[in-house]
Image: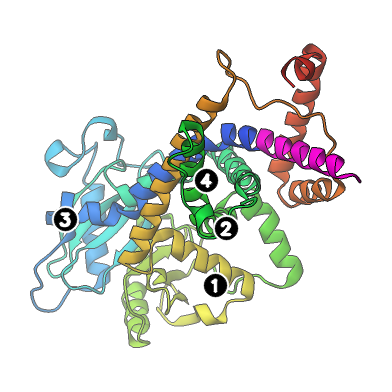
Amino acid sequence: MSQSGGAAGRRNLYGMFWRWHFFAALIVVPFVLWQSATGVLYLWSERAMDVLHPSQRFVIPQGISKLPSEQVAAALAFAKGRTSAPAANNHMHGMAAHSMHVAGGPIIAAILLPEDKNRSTAVLLRDAHGLTYPVFVDPFHARVLGTLSYIEWLPNFSRLLHGGWPLGKPGSWLLELGDCWAIVMLFTGLYLWWPRGRRFPYFLMPRFRAGARVVLRDLHSTVAVLFSAVFLFFLVSALPWTRFWGGEILERVQAATGQQSPASFSRGGARAAQMSAALPGLDEAVRNVRARGVRGLLEVRLAPEENADWWLANSQTVAADHTIIANAASGVIAHDVTSDQLPAIPRMVAFGIHVHQGDFGAWNIWLNTAFAFSLVWLSVTGIASWWTRRPKGTLSAPPRTGGRWPLWLWGVAIILCVILPIFGLSVLLLFFADRISRLIFPYELKQRG
């Protein structure tokens, strides 16, 4: 191939990547803005609860705390006594005016038993719409301190929004689609940025004297490159949370490769009568768990199925995760799975979850927050850069180059479409839409090229 032919091929490839980077951005920018906002809300939700509702979140230690069963019983008695949404002085108002009752009594999603003696116990209940709200209990007096609406209970509400609520499965599919196209946007962007003739460290510095178009491009690409590794980690580690790729693809891969986690998970949901009958076993289960040296906040769940066991976990401790199964009646521990007992895939998934949630401490939360703001920055500067580079008076995509895809690019695209089926389906739809547009506008390439 001649030098001129090679240069033309590189120009065509650059144009292809530029065009697909643009289409990826159309899909990704709304996803990025939504996930950044809800993600930051989730990261700071626990601290926000401490500031906004200190009288419910904190207690003054006074002697020996009551048994967990007594604390839960107080919360259930409080919930059973509510015939409608609590009044404003109980921190329920506005959109939160949902019925607090479900036929058969309150449904218990989880029990949060803190190790910190200055904190209250939280019994998480589900309302008639399946939304979670907390009842706070003073552990030293088994006295209810108050409750919040599902909207005010930010740790759960922000997580719901981050996961695609209220759209359900379609919401998760859309988030997965945005995640996949963000991976495409990342790699096409790196190709477009790749320093051609610029030396380190100058290719990481914006060229402020090169004009508005170049400055905007550099401000966009420099931040993207600096956060690219973090960006890719968050995108890949988020896929196991999705309902299709995580719930269908990954689970089948784990089953086929013997990488299934021995640590089960309970969604909770026991009715009040079932929970009340199992409360004596809860006391013994918690006692046995603490006797094993399990530290941190203890999350306890009981599934609604008959003969369900207690499920207990302290997954916020990172280095010493425990998932424990105890007999509902006796509290005797049947299984205790620690993080070092997990196979490679579930261990990597668990690590990704910890990083996403900011469980490694304040530095982790601040890093995630900075990353979220960097995504907002990239969205704004990307739109501004496109606006300055587009042909005047149009709102069009970068023009088609007319060149052919090299074989290696076809191979990469096919592999991505197979590994990420929802992405593959969207690519097919875009392909057919592009073909149809060529039939409708056959002279676009000639006129704009």
Which residue was labeled with disc 1? 263
Q: Badges 1 and 2: C-beta atoms under 8 Å apart? A: no
**In the rendering, at what x and y percent does residue 216 appear?**
47, 37
Q: Is residue 21 above or below residue 398?
A: below
| Residue at disc 1, secondary structure | loop
Q: Amino acid at mark 1?
A: Ala
Q: Which comes before the other along the chain, label 2 or label 4?
A: 2
- Tell me the tag on residue 221: 4
The mark nearer the N terminus, 1 or 3, is 3
Mark 3, mark 2: which one is toward the viewer? 2
In the rendered structure, which disc, 1 or 4, sits on the residue that comes first in sequence?
Answer: 4
Q: Is residue 423 left or right of residue 204?
A: right
Q: Indicate the amino acid at tag 2.
A: Arg
Which class describes the residues within 10 Å of circle 4: few (<14), some (14-19), or many (20+)?
Answer: many
Range shown magenta: 1-20
Q: Are marks 1 and 3 in contact (CB under 8 Å)?
A: no
- State whether the magenta stretch is mostly helix, strand or loop: helix
Q: CA distance from mark 4 to mark 3?
A: 46 Å
- Whichever of callouts 1 and 2 sits on the residue coming sooner in the sequence is 2
Q: In the image, what residue type sits under mark 4?
A: Ser
Residue 175 quadrant: top right
The amino acid type, in three-letter code, at marker 3 is: Gln
Q: Quote the CA–CA distance across marks 3 and 2.
A: 57 Å
